[in-house]
Amino acid sequence: MNFPALKNTRFLDALALQPVDRTPVWMMRQAGRYLPEYKATRADAGDFLALCKNTDLACEVALQPLRRFDLDASILFSDILTIPDAMGQGLYFAEGEGPKFRKVIRSAVDVERLPDVNIADELSYVTDAVALIRKELNGSVPLIGFSGSPWTLATYMIEGGGSQGFRLAKQFLYDHPEAMHLLLDKLARAVTDYLNAQIRAGAQAVQIFDTWGGILSSAAYREFSLDYMSKIIGGLITENEGRKVPAIVFTKNGGQWLQAIAGSACQAIGLDWTPDIGTARRLVGERVALQGNMDPTLLYAGADAIRREVAAILKSFGAGPGHVFNLGHGITPEVDPEHVAVFVEAVHELSSQYHA
C-alpha cells in the first residue's frame, strides 16, 4: 500500500536519538472521553467495542485530537484486549466497570484449549482501521500501533477483568508456573503477529502497554513480563517503507527496571510519572529514547501549574534529542480540553531551547 510521504518526522527522529527542532508530544488515550466529539461518535456507535470494530468511526476518533491540538503522532484507536477476545474469551464492557471476560482461565487445561489467533480473520477490523487512519493522516504525522503485553493480557484473562490486587493472576503464576509460561508464550506469539500486521497495514511505530508489569517482584517481572516483551521485539518487523519501525515499551511502575528494559532491544521506554526523567536519562539515555512523563492529574490544574511541570520535566531531561513528551499514563475522562491545549502549547514553546 502506498501512502503519502511523511511531513512531520519529529516523533520518529526523537525515537532514533536524532536531532529535532523541538520535543515531540502526543498523549496516551489522546482519542478519548475528555473530548465531546468523541462522546458523540461513541454514542453513534452504540458502545465502546462497537466503536473499535467500526473502521470509519475508529478512524474518526483517532483523528479528532489532531484537529484540536498540534500533536506529533497519532495512535490507533482500539483496545488492548482484542487478542484475548479473538481467542474466544468473550470481551464485553460493563457500564462503569470497564472490560470483562465471559470466560476465564483457571487451569492448565484452559490454557491448552486456547486457539491460535488468525489475525487476518479475527482482527481484520484493527488492521483495516490502521490502514484507513494512515490514509486519512495524509502524511501529517506518524501513526502508532499498539498491543497489551502478554502479562497484562494474562491478568485480565485470569481475573476476568480489572483487579485491585491481582490475587488470582499471581496465585496462578506461583501455583502453575508452567501453565503461565504456556499462556504467555501463546500470547507473545499472537502479539508479535498482531503488531507485524499493524506495521504491514501502515503503523510506523508500535507500543507495548505493560500496564500491570509493575505489580510483580523484580524476579517475576523479568521472568513473566519482560522476557516475553523481549521475544516480541525480537520478532517484529524492524523496517518498512524504507524507515525503521521503533518499538516502545511502557511498564507502569517499572522505573526500577529501566536498565533491564533497555536491554530488551526496544528503541524507547515509556515512563510513568514516578521516576525522575533526568535520572532515567543518565541510566539509559545513551541506549534508548525516553517517553513521558507528566502526571496526568496535572491536567486538572490551572495553566500556570501545567506550564511549571512541563518546564521542570524538560529541564530535568536536559538538552539534546531522545525525549518524546507524553503523560505518565492515559489522559482521564474529566479533563478540560482547554487544559490539554495549554499542555501541548507549553511543550512546543518551552522545548525549543533544548534543541538549539
Image (cartoon, helix red, strand yellow):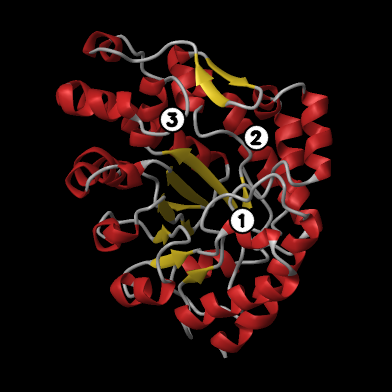
Instruction: Where is residue 335? Give x, y as percent.
Output: 72, 52
Query: Which residue is at a point 66% across and 50% down the rendered structure image?
Result: 30
Dot 1 or dot 2, earlier in sequence: 1
Of the two numbered discs 3 and 2 in the rendering, the one whose residue sits closer to the viewer: 3
Instruction: Inspect the image, locate mark 3, and give the three-letter code of the amino acid beneath it.
Output: Ser
Instruction: Where is residue 289? Give x, y as percent.
Output: 42, 67
Q: Is 23 situated above or below 340?
A: below
10 Å neighbourhood of mark 3: few (<14), some, or many (≥20)? few
* SS class, disc 3: loop
State the CA–CA distance, disc 3 to disc 2: 30 Å
Instruction: Where is residue 131? Give x, y as percent.
Output: 64, 39
10 Å neighbourhood of mark 2: few (<14), some, or many (≥20)? many
Instruction: Inspect the image, locate mark 2, and give the three-letter code of the amino acid beneath it.
Output: Ala
Query: Which residue is at a point 49% across and 71% down the rendered structure image?
Result: 323
Instruction: Where is residue 64? Give x, y as percent.
Output: 77, 48
* SS class, disc 1: loop
Q: Is 224 situated above or below 246?
A: above
Looking at the rendered image, the quarter that the C terminus falls into is: bottom right
Instruction: Name the residue tied to disc 2.
Output: 129
Of residue 263 and residue 30, the one placed in the foreground of this image is 30
10 Å neighbourhood of mark 1: few (<14), some, or many (≥20)? many
* SS class, disc 2: helix
Query: Which residue is at a point 56% across and 67% down the rendered structure image?
Result: 325
State the CA–CA distance, disc 1 to disc 3: 24 Å
Of the two numbered discs 1 and 3 in the rendering, the one whose residue sits closer to the viewer: 3
Q: Is residue 86 left or right of residue 327?
A: left
Instruction: Name the residue tied to disc 1.
Output: 27
Q: Is residue 82 left or right of residue 253?
A: right
Q: Which label was assigned to residue 121?
A: none
Instruction: Name the residue tied to disc 3.
Output: 163
Dot 1 or dot 3, earlier in sequence: 1
